[in-house]
């Protein structure tokens, strides 16, 4: 095998640069010490008072920088919308990535509802444990990916239902933000009772935010998977 033909010069240069940067930055990463700064301590204290969430990271994502999360969801929507427009002209569809595997076909009937349930668990418990709407949404979409791989062309995704779920969850997410402005003069303000920390009914509006985010992300990622796995000419 001729390496000059197999490996492009640009690929070699990029690999060399990445390797050098890794070597230079490695001592910094190895010397990293986890310390709680005064800002971190203040954030943790503020989290318990204003959100009642056991997961401070969740509070930052959905409450303290809710507008940023709204922007991330918008970027995801625009990206998938653009992909849909670009691939919609390919009318001939074929599940080119399907596998003829009896074990996979049998297992998917058991795993599909379990993965969906696990995804919703991650979404609903995002204010208590690591996880949330983005992670749970992707897990739910992975269940549909497994179904597509196992069932071949026997599975048809109803894009109308997907679009309705995506639209309603997006509208609900924005509605929570404006309700915060109207009720307590703050976008995504916590206008619901905080509840008791470390219980499921806690965190005020944060669980609702993550539910809307999870449904929206799962719908959009499932549609994206369907676009790529079924378009024959995308290869």
Image (tube, grey):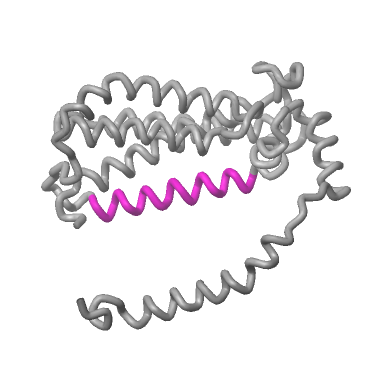
Residue at point 34%, 37% (across, down):
222
Relative vertical location of residue 65 with respect to residue 206 in this rendering, above or below: below
Magenta stretch?
Answer: 67-87
Residue at point 64%, 45% (across, down):
67
Q: Main secondary structure of the magenta part?
A: helix
Q: Is residue 157 magenta?
A: no
Q: Residue furthest left?
A: 92
Q: Quadrant of residue 221?
A: top left
Q: Is residue 187 visible?
A: no
Horizontal side of 19 relative to 90 (left or right) equals: right
Relative vertical location of residue 150 with respect to residue 81 in this rendering, above or below: above
Q: Quadrant of residue 129?
A: top right
Which quadrant is home to the C terminus? bottom left
Residue 22, how many percent across, how many down?
57, 69
Q: Nearer the viewer, residue 96 or 181?
A: 96
Q: Is residue 31 visible?
A: yes
């Amino acid at each position: 095998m001729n390496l000059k033909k197999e490996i492009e010069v640009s690929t070699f240069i990029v690999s060399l640069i990445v390797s050098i940067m890794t070597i230079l930055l490695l001592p910094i990463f190895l010397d990293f010490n986890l310390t709680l700064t005064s800002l971190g301590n203040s954030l943790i204290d503020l989290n318990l008072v204003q959100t009642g969430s056991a997961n401070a990271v969740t509070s930052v994502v959905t409450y303290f920088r809710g507008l940023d999360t709204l922007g991330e969801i918008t970027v995801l929507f625009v990206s998938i919308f653009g992909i849909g427009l670009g691939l919609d002209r390919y009318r001939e569809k074929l599940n080119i990535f399907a596998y003829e595997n009896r074990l996979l076909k049998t297992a998917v009937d058991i795993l599909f509802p379990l993965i969906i349930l696990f995804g919703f668990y991650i979404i609903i418990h995002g204010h208590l444990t690591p996880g949330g709407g983005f992670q749970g949404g992707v897990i739910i979409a992975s269940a549909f990916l497994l179904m597509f791989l196992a069932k071949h062309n026997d599975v048809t995704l109803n894009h109308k239902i997907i679009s309705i779920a995506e639209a309603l969850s997006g509208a609900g997410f924005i509605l929570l933000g404006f309700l915060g402005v109207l009720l307590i003069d703050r976008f995504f303000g916590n206008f619901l009772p905080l509840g008791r920390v470390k219980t499921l009914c806690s965190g005020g509006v944060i669980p609702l935010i993550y539910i809307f985010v999870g449904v929206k992300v799962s719908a959009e990622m499932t549609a994206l998977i369907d676009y790529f796995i079924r378009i024959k000419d995308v290869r």
